Amino acid sequence: MNQPRRGQGPMLNFTKMHGLGNDFMVVDAISQPFRLRPEMIRELADRHFGIGFDQLLVVEPPGLPDVDFRYRIFNSDGSEVEQCGNGARCFARFVRDQRLTNKKVIRVQTAKGVIELRVGRGGMVTVDMGVPELNPPAIPFAADRRKEVYTVEVGDETVELSAVSMGNPHGVLVVDNVDTAPVAELGPRLENHPRFPARANIGFLQIVDRTHVRLRVFERGSGETMACGSGACAAVVAGCLRGLLDSRVDVELSGGHLVIEWQGEGSPVMMEGPTASVFEGQLRLPGDQPPRRRKNTRQGDTRPGQQRQQNRHRQPVISKP
Ligand SMILES: N[C@@H](CCC[C@H](N)C(=O)O)C(=O)O
């Protein structure tokens, strides 16, 4: 019954999840074949015509010894990236829910090294996000030497930011109030600033007190999200380096709270927070063959006709709650 017709590909099972409203399409690429081109990821990420998500997370077999899985991350613009903190927590819940493992401590290979996920009670997961990288070329950030705060020209304006890599690059600005911070204006300009040659996630950090901050993040390749786990880690590292924060901090994001702990230079950043599974679905992927033109399709109708057919293929079918 589910036999693909000409122009159609196989069915793909996926799970929609989120960590504090930072939402994901999660795919098990161990039990089913999976390959998507960037334009298809962009279509699926579309909140009106697709499933809608900030990142696509893919579970693959590991390529290293002593590691349980390989974790691949794609932004909604189709770009593959190195790290996703909220995604890492959802990843841990997903591989257990799907019975791909029953371990409580899961070691996962990312594009920038191995991270460790610890599954707790009630959907809570703690992630060892690794040691932050502060050396400018490794972030990558253009600077002649390492500093806690850099001055960056953005058009006629000058802003001060800290640059941190949590496996992925972050710029962190301290602001008086996140509600009025110019996230939509400065976010994309700094994301694409020439001093961040691989682009960057841009965090706007409000210090409430030494153990409590508020944070908004304009994410590279996805725009402002309701929460960014690696951004929360980078913000706490930046705040600690500037002498503004203690080692354990409650980070308040638009979608909820994370607890971030960092004992200082050379130690890993620990992130603790919730996970949520929203629904499971199935969609028909397009095949390698272009869809056959309908007999009555006129010459000029080819593209909209193909578009309609592709839209139908990518409608998710909700299979169970
Ligand atoms: N939402 C994520 C970060 C996802 C990747 C990021 N947009 C990048 O391009 O580096 C998180 O929770 O860390």
Image: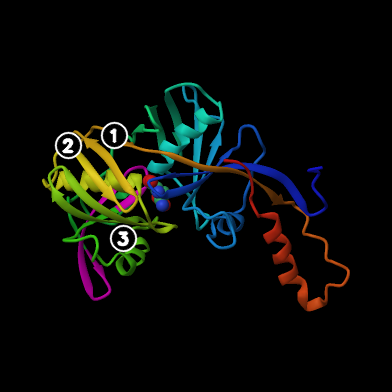
Q: CA distance from mark 3 to mark 1?
A: 28 Å
Secondary structure under tag 2 reads loop
Q: Quadrant of the N terminus?
A: top right
Mark 2 surroundings within 10 Å by alpha-carbon count, few (fewer than 14), some (14 through 19), many (20 or more) = some
Proximity of marks 3 and 1: CB atoms separated by less than 8 Å:
no
- Depth check: give the residue in front, 168 or 45: 45
Judging by the rendered image, the residue that carries numbered circle 2 is 247
The answer to which of marks 3 and 1 sits earlier in the sequence is 3
Main SS of residues in magenta: strand
Whether residue 167 is in magenta: the answer is: yes
Disc 3 C-beta below 8 A from ligand 1: no
**Which corner quadrant of the image does residue 108 belong to?**
top left
Q: Quadrant of the C terminus?
A: top right
The nearer-to-camera label among 3 and 2 is 2
Secondary structure under tag 1 reads strand
Mark 1 surroundings within 10 Å by alpha-carbon count, few (fewer than 14), some (14 through 19), many (20 or more) = many
The nearer-to-camera label among 3 and 1 is 1
Rendered residue at 62%/49% (across/down)? 36
Proximity of marks 3 and 2: CB atoms separated by less than 8 Å:
no
- Depth check: give the residue in front, 267 or 311: 311
Judging by the rendered image, the residue that carries numbered circle 1 is 270
Disc 2 C-beta below 8 A from ligand 1: no
Picture coordinates of residue 10, whole percent (x, y):
73, 44
Looking at the image, residue 143 lies above or below residue 262: below
Q: Which amino acid does the dot numbered 3 rest on?
A: Arg
State the extent of the magenta-drawn residues as a range. 152-170
**Which corner quadrant of the image does residue 157 belong to?**
bottom left
The answer to which of marks 3 and 2 sits earlier in the sequence is 3
